Amino acid sequence: MNEPDKQIMDGCTAATHIAYALSELATIYPITPIASMGETADKWALHGRLNIWGRPMEVKEMESELGAAGATHGAAAAGALATTFTASQGLLLMIPNMYKIAGELLPVVFHVGTRSIAAHALSIFGDHQDVMACRGTGFAMLASGSVQEVMDLGLVAHLAAIEGRVPVLHFFDGWRTSNEISTIDTISYDTIAGMVNGEKISVFKASAMNPDHPDMRGTAQNPDVYFQFREAANPFYDRFPAIVQSAMDRVAEATGRRYHLFDYDGDPDADRVIVIMGSGAEVASQTSEALNRRGQHTGVISVRLFRPFSAEALMKAIPASVRSIAVMDRCKEPGSEGEPLLLDVASAVLESRRDIKVIGGRYGLSSKDFNPAMVMAVFDEMSRQQPRRRFTVGITDDVSHLSLDVDTTDDLTPPDMHQAIFYGMGSDGTVGATRQITQIAGSEEGLYAQAYFHYSAKKSGGYTISQLRIAPHPIRAAYAIESADYVGCNKNSYIGRFELLDKIRDGGTFVLNTSMSVQDMESRIPAAMKRAIAGRRLKFYAVDATSIAAANGLGARINTIMATVYLRLSGVIDYDKAVAQLRELVSAAYRHEGNAMVEANMAAIDAAPAAIKQIDYPATWAQEKDHPADQPTVPQFISRIARPCMRLKGDSLPVSLFRPDGVIPMGTTAYEKRCIAINVPEWDPDKCVQCTICSLVCSHAAIRPVVATTAETDGAPDGFVTAGGRGSFKGMRYRIQVYAADCTGCSSCAVV
């Protein structure tokens, strides 16, 4: 077994590490949330990184996912070991070529960060709907549930494809695993090279299309022979589960991490078992362990190889004592008797003739959180005399009444685990800073770190929530933080908009980026937040990071400042050592922007500690009363759906509020005033030529030209400036109205 190389990386990088080692060519088309795989491979190739054969991977960006799949097929047919990275609609565009690749028994590997499919609406977030649409293509399907597994099972995918001549779709949960950063042990390219069957590669290349020994492929066939040709490939699929297990065994010999087609984790005498794949398996296993310590008898089957499905291997993994199984699918297949994994497991149990009740549930669509409380609800359902045959968990279904009740009071967080939540804005650097903190903590001897990021679909300018965990042991927590030790709010306008303190523990630390004085806080901090601060006895700090950033020419990027503040206040890592590492990371990150940018960030780091002000809030905040303001009447959709979603409370909304066809009314943006701009434009009527181009380039309709008659502007309040109209506006009054609450501060209007 080789000495492990401990590194911090996300799931996309782990997959790319393996794909780069074992591929000669990658044809790519960027798609959220896996675009970084192709970008990373391309960057490595440009920097001269070599695969195990001593050559850079050739990376080709195509004009669509369809083109990427076609090029992958063509490259493999010509004898190249080829790969691609994709998800969601992009993966669906590849399906026709996947049938061809599998039909020709080409050892291709697709790495997929699974994502929702656009049905009633588009979602950029993760579940298994895309890969489940591919299960008839003939690709083997191998599931990873953590960043470490992406590294290990990604290698298994390539080794097995080469050995068995069956293409492999290696998938892992989009966002939850693809973008999660975690401390893992990497596998060196020298180790990988020693596992590869060179003879099989030689046979593959010798049988590729070649003018020196021409043959014909992709013919059109009649009913007399097509069926027979399809059946001729059966032995390859019959042998493939054993080939995958052999590859898993080779990885175990090299790393000490052992995998099976179906891994059982739990009480050897369990009476209830959950069968699940992907990151949900990590959550289920952790919860099962906690329940077993309390005297229950539970277990979890983690599905690794979903296709070809080995019923024999599954039944061997299930303890003889099991009487009830709940199969969890992270997808929805409307009109089916059950989701894909449920039907396979139910069939295997039926054929085994074992007396086991099988029920099935749906969870986690579009990255909906799946946490230990939900797992407990599933185990509780199995304990009932008459459990539901089909159910959902994680939502409130008051239409079909399929949802399980969930008790959220049980916290399984280990006492030695530090947890932090950072509220930021897309493009302000909060996510990057959290990544740097994770890298610093994860590289510390004896510490492990994990970071996960939740993004608004608005991306740049939308909110971001970065979640960080640090512990003296490997971290198995593929779900959102419920009890944070530290909460940082990097955007002042989030006060009153989000319930920033609903996930902080008593006595925790709250840090607010603001220029408000204590006197300002009395009038501007909502009563509910005051009650939370005082009632939970929080340590409350204010930092004017925005002013520090402006003084040092950093614009809206407050990331290095708030990262320094966290390292100073959290006490998880030695401050002097951690800041020294932060300086190195910041220098490397901004070097390409020039020395002036590096120095500006260093100056901001130096200024941060002195800017921290502890707020000595009065004890009376604990009894602060709400002051209800007059609220104008708004449409029901806004009051019942839109506003809760804007306040990050959409998870609590029941099914009955939503139209089944996904239709929503027009004009909802008028009710969302985000107030996120630090600087807003000011109209100068003396310089304005009334071209209205500033309004044309404003992507948020915050700049609006207005013309009015003199009679309409008479009696306007002081400060309401207009100018005499020009050209076709002659005789009218002209004004550019800036809607500051809608502005993002992008400066496009001023530049143009």
Image (spheres, helix red, strand yellow):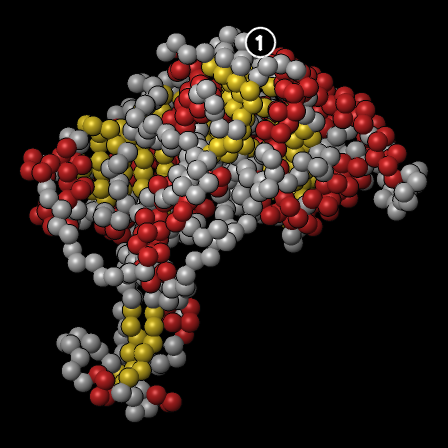
* Position of the N terminus by quadrant: top right
Q: Quadrant of residue 309?
A: top right
In the image, residue 698 lies at what x, y percent?
39, 66
Horizontally, residue 158 falls left or right of residue 678, namely right
Tag count in the figure?
A: 1
Residue at horizontal 80 percent and vertical 39 percent from the top: 77
| Residue highlighted by disc 1 | 320
Give residue 509's position: percent from left, percent from top: 22, 32
For residue 310, what is the image quadrant?
A: top right
Q: In the depicted view, which residue is nearer to us: 201 or 476?
A: 476
Q: What is the quadrant of the C terminus in the image?
A: bottom left
Left or right relative to 534: residue 15: right
* Residue occupying image coordinates x 51% and y 8%: 268
Query: Which residue appears farthest toward the front when viewing the image?
Result: 386
Name the residue rendered at 9%, 38% in the picture: 623
Q: Is residue 275 left or right of residue 416?
A: right
Q: Please name the amino acid that badge 1 sits on.
A: Ala
Q: Is residue 226 visible?
A: yes
- Where is residue 473 shown, x and y percent of the image? 40, 17
> In the rendered view, would you say 380 is above or below 421?
above
Query: Where is residue 85, by image quadrant?
Result: top right
Q: Position of residue 573 (x, y in %)?
A: 30, 24
- Label 1 SS: loop
Crowdedness near tag 1: few (<14), some (14–19) or many (≥20) residues, C-alpha within 10 Å: some
Q: Residue at x 72, y 18 (%)?
A: 242
Viewer can see residue 71: no
